[in-house]
Amino acid sequence: MPCAAQTAIGIRDHLTIFGNDYDTPDGTCLRDYIHVTDLAKGHVKAVEYAQKNKGVEIFNLGTGNPYSVTEIVETFEKVNGVTVNHVYGPRRDGDLPNCYANADKAMKMLGWKTEKTLEDMCRDLWKWQQMNPNGYKE
């Protein structure tokens, strides 16, 4: 997603989508994108849990709903009214066709689940990118 925003604002001349021949609905990889605020809230819940419980637990934090790379680009363009120039390149070695989280344990034990939609992610990223066209200053 950051590469899509950087392309839309002109930092990159195009976005390369690696592989469009996977066995997925549109041929591009499926990934579990999560809004940074949902992720931060999940971390807070995990810290609160750790403060009250002994031992070690592992929690997956994600939406559990994969989106294709092409779907991300199309949603980003639609929500923000911008164009993301993109090309399809060859697959990268080691890329899986799909990868997404099962956050059932986090919901059950932490009471955590995502709240933000893909549209929220795209809108908030574009707002941030416009406010910080060169990223954060040191």
Image (tube, rainbow, N blue to C red):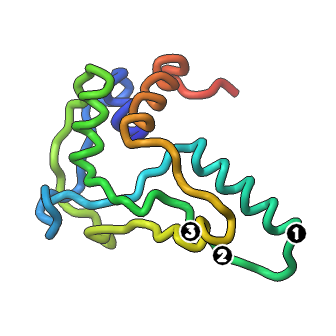
Picture quadrant where residue 12 is located? top left
Q: Earlier in the sequence, mark 1 or mark 3?
A: 1
Pointer 3 with pointer 2, Cβ within 8 A:
yes
Q: Nearer the viewer, residue 105 or 93?
A: 105
* Disc 2 secondary structure class: loop
**In the image, 101: left or right of 47?**
left
- The residue drawn where x is 71% and y is 78% is 57
Q: Secondary structure at mark 1?
A: helix
| Residue positioned 37% across, 36% down in the render | 119
Residue 137 placement (x, y as % from top left):
65, 24
Q: Which residue is mark 3?
A: 60
| Mark 2: amino acid | Ile
Q: Is residue 90 left or right of residue 41?
A: left
Q: Nearer the viewer, mark 1 or mark 2?
A: 1
Mark 1 → mark 3, Cα distance in angstroms: 19 Å
Which percent across, then down, holds residue 102? 47, 71
Left-right relation of 32 to 21: right
Q: Residue at x 62, y 27 (%)?
A: 136
| Whether label 1 touches label 2, CB < 8 Å | no
Image location of residue 97, percent across then percent down: 26, 69
The image's mark for residue 58 is 2
Q: Nearer the viewer, mark 1 or mark 3?
A: 1
